[in-house]
Image: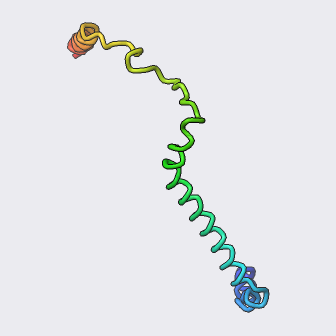
Amino acid sequence: MNIRLYILATFNLDAIGEANGISIAVMGMLIVFCALGLIFIFIGCLPRLMVYLEPWLPEMESHAPAPEESLPLDRDKIIVAIATALKQRQRHN
């Protein structure tokens, strides 16, 4: 409890003003705001930039299988699986 009172008694905003703390904080916020603004502009321009870079950047192959390469759904196997599950459920009830 004594530590809290000591901190409250010794803390004041005069030290921040004397050491240019407010101007440093404002400059820091401006730097971060400008950096975020540049990132926002870059991301917004990226689709237009990719149009110009497309001839030099080859299209990458995907690791996912193409839709025609994926296994087709066997409707009969699905029906048999559902029927088996329903039959087992009826036996247990």
Q: In this view, does 89 lie to the left or right of 70?
A: left
| Residue 67 placement (x, y as % from top left) | 38, 20
In the rendered image, the vertical position of residue 66 relative to residue 19, given as above or below: above
- What is the quadrant of residue 83 in the picture? top left
Q: Which residue lies furthest to the right in this view?
A: 19
Q: In this view, does 61 lie above or below 31?
A: above
Q: Which residue is drawn at 63% across and 64% down?
A: 35
Q: Which residue is drawn at 73% across and 90% down?
A: 17
Relative image position of residue 62 (x, y in whole percent): 51, 26
Residue 92 seen by the camera: no
Residue at the location (54% across, 60% down)?
41
State the image coordinates of residue 48 (x, y, percent, origin top left): 49, 49
Please indicate, yes or no, whether residue 3 appears anywhere in the rendered image. yes
Q: Would residue 47 be found to the left or right of residue 93 on screen? A: right
Judge whether 68 appears above or below 24 on screen: above
Q: Which of 13 and 2 is in front in this view?
A: 13
| 66 lies left or right of 25 | left
